[in-house]
Image (cartoon, rainbow, N blue to C red):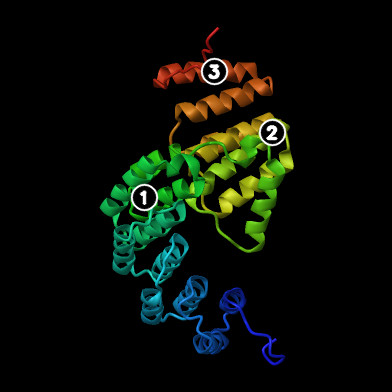
Amino acid sequence: MVSQGVRESASTFSSVLGVYNDAGFCREGMQVHCRVVSLGFGLNLYVGSSLVDLYFHMGLDNVALKLFDELLDRNLAVWNVLLRGFCVLCQVDELCGVFSRMELDGVDPSALTYCYLIRGCCSGRLLEAGKQLHCRIVRDGWVESKTFVANALVDLYCACGSLIDATEAFEAIPKKVYTENGLPLDALELFAEMQFWEKRPSIGLLTLFVGFLNLASRTENFELGKQMHSYVVKLGFGHGGNVYVQSALIDMYGKCGDIESSVSIYEIVHEQTLEFCNSLMTSLLHCGVIVDVVEMFVMMVDEGIGLDEVLYPRP
């Protein structure tokens, strides 16, 4: 294109820099930067944003920050590029400083902005700063509207070793995941893509596992249930791990007619909670093992395990 005398536009440079950046062609990107300057596009917002991203990928954060400061106009997108750069480099102080500058500049944060800040708190194990950030996120309504923000909060508390806060953040995640919205095929396709690219789901995405297990229970899809079980164990969430996953596994095997597996999972849990007992009793009832249901009810009464509306439904 250049050899034929066709002059580039801002969109041309932005697209080419994005491709070079994704492919790791840093030297070629720097050559494009030279041409950007020679043609007077250095101060263009979109070209400048691509250059900032390029130099962050090269680890040259000082150059990236200098280019950012030279931009005459800055929108939310370019601020997020800067925040992401410092987030990836785990430079927490610089990340917080950029966010303060962004607020002084009158730019309102987006859900993505908060995700970068949460990741920064994860890297620095900044529990108190993370809690303050959590309050702002709740105030702005991002927990209810953006599941990936809620997932990031769960990861934050786990990284800081605050399991109580992690549990509360997990329980606050909206349960309207793909499988609950009538889109199981889309959810399965997304999950398959994650496996293909070897992306390990975060703890917050346990909601997705539970959703798949519930889907397997409702449809009595035994193969799907077993595949999810294998993946859960592989990631370390099985064998007495997460209460929601374990309960869903007990229920899934029972609904699919494999009561032996339901009982086996129940027996390896660390504590016989109401959730586990309800799941197993439901499975026993589904499989018609009435005698064991009665014995389990007696055990729950003797052990002082509470009874709820699952056992005593309202008329």
Type of amino acid at the residue the image marks with label 2: Asp
Q: Which residue is mark 3?
A: 295
Looking at the image, can residue 256 be seen?
no
Give the residue drawn at x 62%, y 57%.
194
Q: Specify whether 191 is left or right of 77.
A: right
Query: Label 1: which residue?
Result: 157
Identified at 50% across, 84% down, the residue is: 40
The label number, if any, that marks residue 166 in the structure image = none
Q: Is residue 97 above or below residue 268?
A: below
Q: Are marks 2 and 1 in contact (CB under 8 Å)?
A: no
Disc 2 packing (10 Å; few <14; some 14–19; many ≥20): some
Q: CA distance from mark 3 to mark 1?
A: 39 Å
- Secondary element under disc 2, as helix, strand or loop, is loop
Q: Is residue 183 left or right of residue 151?
A: right
Do residues under tags 2 and 3 come within 8 Å of each other at their CB atoms?
Answer: no
Sequence order check, earlier mark of 2 and 1:
1
Depth order, front residue of 205/55: 55
- Is the residue under label 1 in contact with that under label 3 (CB below 8 Å)? no
